[in-house]
Amino acid sequence: MKVIEIDNLKKTYSESEVEVHAVNGVTLDIEEGEFTAIVGPSGSGKTTLLNMIGGLDIPTSGEVIIGGSNMNHLNGSELTDFRKNNIGFVFQAYNLIPVLTAKENTEFVMKLQGKSKVECEKRSKELLESVGLGERINARPNKMSGGQQQRVAVARALASKPKFVLADEPTANLDSKSTETLLDIMEKLNKEENITFVFSTHDARVVKKARRVITLEDGKILSDVRKNGGE
Amino acid sequence: MNRLFKMAWRNIWRNRRRTLITAASIFFAVFFAIVMRSIQLGTYGHMISQSIEKFSGYLQLQNPEYFDEPSLDNFIENSDDIIKKLNATEGVKVAVPRIETFVLASSGHQSKGVLVTGIDPEQEMFVSNPEHMLAKYKLTPEIVEKLLTETNLEKKQIELLKFNENKLYHDLDRLALDLGLNPSDFEQYHGLLNKYASYSGEYLSKNDDGILVSSRLATFLRSTVGDTIVLLGQGRYGATAAGLFPIRGIVRVPSPDLDNKLVYMSLSRAQIFLDMPDMLTSIAMNLDDNDDMFDIQASINSTLDKEKYVVKNWEEINPTLKQQIDGDDKSGQMFLGILYFIIFFGIFGTVMMMIAERKREFGVLVAIGMRKSKLAIILVFEMLMVGFIGTVSGMLAALPLVYSFYVNPFHITGEMAKMYEDMGFEAVMPTAPVEGYFAIQGFIILLMVIVACIIPLQRIRKMKVMNALRS
């Protein structure tokens, strides 16, 4: 089943008199349960593409359809609600809310969804345990390592039971051990719970784990390779 | 809402120093605003109390012509019925008959225009209460010399003693205060004062032929109890009014202006002196609740024979005092406005700094699904909390100070006191009771916080998530 449908997506920045085509006519579909890496050199349009898929950036033209909803037809508040209910985000710089504990960060989106306290607590505990942070649920971000923070970010992204998770360079700030742990967790969640992951990355270790690798160059898809088994 | 409140509370302590500095600036603004406002309102209240409640009354019943032409020719009849009717009016505490006119007073080579006030000595106790103002002590040169030679006063107290020489006092507590002495330490001087500074004097009886003279006027006329002074003026319809009046007592009137010119006379004697049998110039009234003044005035006026009577309020009778208070009030409010204006920019700067510092975080919150309206609520909560901390602590700090000076007004001494008295004010600095003006400061801070949040909230509304995430 298609989770994301992208049709001839373009994003053009007009800075001074020069037009920059960050994304230039991308068309692709992402199926449920895929573990996809979008790769390419700096400036190839990976992050811009991811932002448009996530409804954070508005395309110049083209369409992004998620679960049958055309993102172009949603206004600001509708987009915010759509993201809350359908998309999980993992950022390069973790971006946890500094005044909340790991548990509270994980519960945050669920509470925005209006879920009950009991449900929030149960799921946040489960998720934090699944990312190996069952013992650190009451720690605030400033008391955790980068790797731990990124694992909390993954737990937060999954808490709202999204249709897919977008991860923008999730391992860029992590050491190799933390990267390995994080990737193992995400791969496990993908395989066991059929959660769809879409990464933008430079990291060869992420590419190695991905079962589908889309290579961008100058805003266009250079290659789209599906691997068998991921390894 | 509870979650947003919790987040806001934690957020304000992320930058503890900034929060404390902002709260401190609000604290000082509220503290000084309350203390200043309290002194202002207290001073106005005191001025009104001294000049209005304890002299002219809040309302006066007069002949309709008297207001424009305050002549004895424009009299009202001294009718028990009307006084009874006024006393029975709801909201009127007391109504007392008066005759007031200006005459020339003379004693020896000294003469001066004075305000003669004919009073019913018994009823007047409920308004200006001259008996309570009767001077019982005088710092005569003799007692000053005794105190200098026989006691161990400090240098500052000696200066104050010399400064207050010849002043009259109703009680020893006030005398101690003027000398900068604690009343409890002052007991050691009581013997000397009772022996050398006691001042005889008595209140007027119903048909007394004598008069009470205000203390500054008595000093000017170089007269004292037992002396006789000449009063010369014009009675009703231009008749000559002249007479010799023995001084029964000296009254120390709190208002320096009145203390320079006031002569109390019994009503019956004034009616003879001014050829006004069974006539009055006014009936002065005090009220149960002064806030009801205009309503009571209108109510009485509506029941009176408009040809014969009119009721005027103190603001009409004494427009100078009203203007003086209004003018000072406006300048005080302007000063407070400037103070709050400065504080406003402190709050505004803090909010702007907060959103600039946390732009990326705001972007993340919106990206993961928080509506901008909720983000705005958090920001407003944060500023309200800082405002609340500063305002409440400012109020709590001001409370004991204001209350303490309300119960024991600060008496100004020395040159400053002289300056106050020269300006016509009694040299005291009272504060107003703890009332609505406390709450107004909290309301102003609340308003400032809301206004200071308008531009930052607009920025949040217009925030582009991508730009925020990139910041």
Image: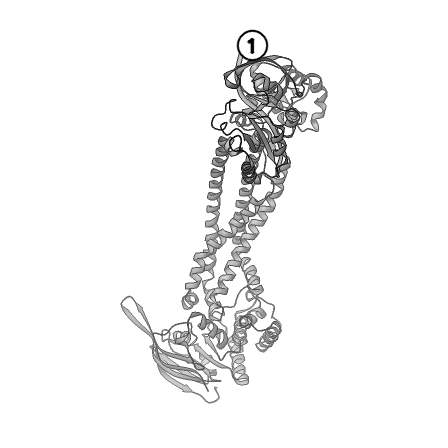
Q: Amino acid at mark 1?
A: Gly
Residue named by callout 1: B108
Above or below, B11 relative to B35: below
Determine which quarter of the picture holds residue A155.
Answer: bottom right
For the point 38% across and 78% down, the residue is: A40
Could you tell me if residue B453 is visible in this image? yes
Above or below, B431 relative to B267: below
Secondary structure of the residue carrying tag 1 is loop
In percent of width and height, residue B325 lies at 50, 35
In percent of width and height, residue B245 lies at 61, 14
**Outermost bottom residue:** A228
In percent of width and height, residue A211 lies at 46, 85
Q: How does the figure colour the protein chain or chains? A: one colour
Nearest the viewer among A26 and B247 is B247
**Chain under disc 1:** B
Could you tell me if residue B427 is visible in this image? no
**Outermost top residue:** B108
Nearest the viewer among A93 and B350 is B350
Determine which quarter of the picture holds residue A51.
Answer: bottom left
Q: How many marks?
A: 1
Above or below, B97 relative to B211: below
Nearest the viewer among A80 and B210 is B210
In percent of width and height, residue B90 lies at 62, 39
Lateral position of residue B97 relative to residue B352, left or right: right
